[in-house]
Amino acid sequence: MTDGLIKIMRFICRVLLALLGGIAGYQLALSMVPHLSEWIGTERLLSKFILSGVFVFLCGSMGFLIAPVFLRILGLIGTLFEKHLQSTRWQDISAATTGLFIGLILANLVAMPFSGLPVGPYIAVFLNLVIGYVLARLFVQRQHDIRGALSLVIGLRQRLNLKKDRSSSGSDDGMEESPMEFVSGKILDTSVIIDGRILDIARTGFLEGPIILPRFVLAELQAVADSRDPNKRTRGRRGLDVVKSLQKIPHLDISIMEIGLKELDVDLVDNGLIALAKKIDGKILTTDYNLNKVAQIRDIVVLNVNDLSNSLKPSLLPGEVAVVDVIREGKEYHQGVGYLENGTMLVVEDGADYIGHRVEVVVTSMLQTSAGRMVFGKVRKEVDE
């Protein structure tokens, strides 16, 4: 069935190319036959008709014969595009298409003053190629900045609308409720709120742009705060206190997005965060290692506070010496484990014999993960306390 369809399509393509070749031959005959008749020395109508037929036949035959080559070239181009599209994100394709569309409009506007010149069409083609390519590439390279600028404009418009609604209703509860519109921003996860370090980051001014707190995350915080487990209840109440403190930071634009898990067609909070980030092209703020990995697989930008914390810790290079208290055994045979002053775990080879003692350790290697940084070293000597 498929082979038969391919043969039919090849035949149709050959017929079309032969027809186009014949039309091109006829157009060529209109300009060439009078000169050939004059050169040959005959003005008979039959001779002109025969010469025109020869042009049409030759060009049509050429179109029919080159059809397989044309189809093969099209197939190669299609395969090349398919390979590139498989490794290209949909965001890049949409950004490039938008940039190309705007570039073509701008190029034609620029080319309009040159339309009356003899070289006007060539200038128009040149401008379309150059400006279209430049803007398509610019939109792909700077798509996050462009989306950020658009989100600021949209967020400003929403805040103005909300202020108008509040002034008409006379209510002000100190927290903006964001309608479900396209608002690109940073989405808070339950874990990052309970962790609390996001509050210190926000106070320093390093956190900017729209900060979105989905209603289902706030509901999960409330459920944790109402838990019968004292530890969970303490953590949940701490998370609610962090949210309240974030509201009081003047330069921070934080808003509640009134959307639930059912509206996103998911059951779990983590899946809801991923679906919402996909929907509004947002970034997820979290400390959850598993959510971090799943979101990255789904091509979502994740801002992990643990990664930020680890990157700010002073690094130890191989060969440097650190003093550490060996407090317990490691996972591997005869290993000891201690912690540096900044909380970094240091695994001491052959350190099991020094548990409860302070030792100088020569750093041999390091391992960086989203869960934290691990330093490996060997005992140099025991330090007298």
Image (spheres, rainbow, N blue to C red):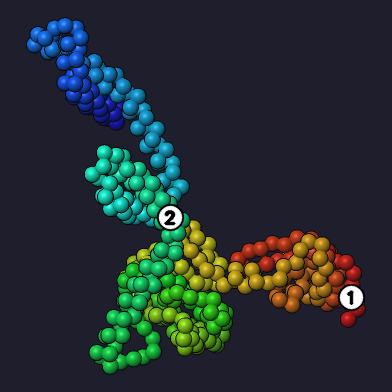
Tell me which amino acid carries mark 2: Leu
Q: Residue furthest top?
A: 41
Which residue appears at 36% of the width and 65% of the height?
A: 279
What kind of element bears circle 1?
loop
The disc label shown at residue 18, or none: none
What kind of element bears circle 2?
helix
In the displayed structure image, the side of residue 33 where residue 297 appears, left or right = right
Q: Quadrant of the N terminus?
A: top left
Quadrant in the rendering for residue 220:
bottom left
Q: Quadrant of the C terminus?
A: bottom right
In this view of the protein, can residue 8 be seen by the observer?
A: no
- Asked whether 117 or 6 is in front, the reply is 117
Where does label 2 land, which residue? 138
Where does label 1 land, which residue? 383
Vertical placement of residue 354 versus 364, above or below = below
In the displayed structure image, the side of residue 149 where residue 227 appears, left or right = right
Which residue appears at 43% of the width and 55% of the height?
A: 138
Alpha-carbon span between mark 2 and mark 1: 59 Å
Vertical placement of residue 192 versus 292, above or below = below
Which residue appears at 34% of the width and 46% of the height?
A: 127
Tell me which amino acid carries mark 1: Val
Which residue appears at 26% of the width and 50% of the height?
A: 113
Q: Residue furthest bottom?
A: 170
Q: Nearer the viewer, mark 2 or mark 1?
A: 2
Q: Earlier in the sequence, mark 2 or mark 1?
A: 2
Residue 336 at what x, y percent from top left?
79, 68
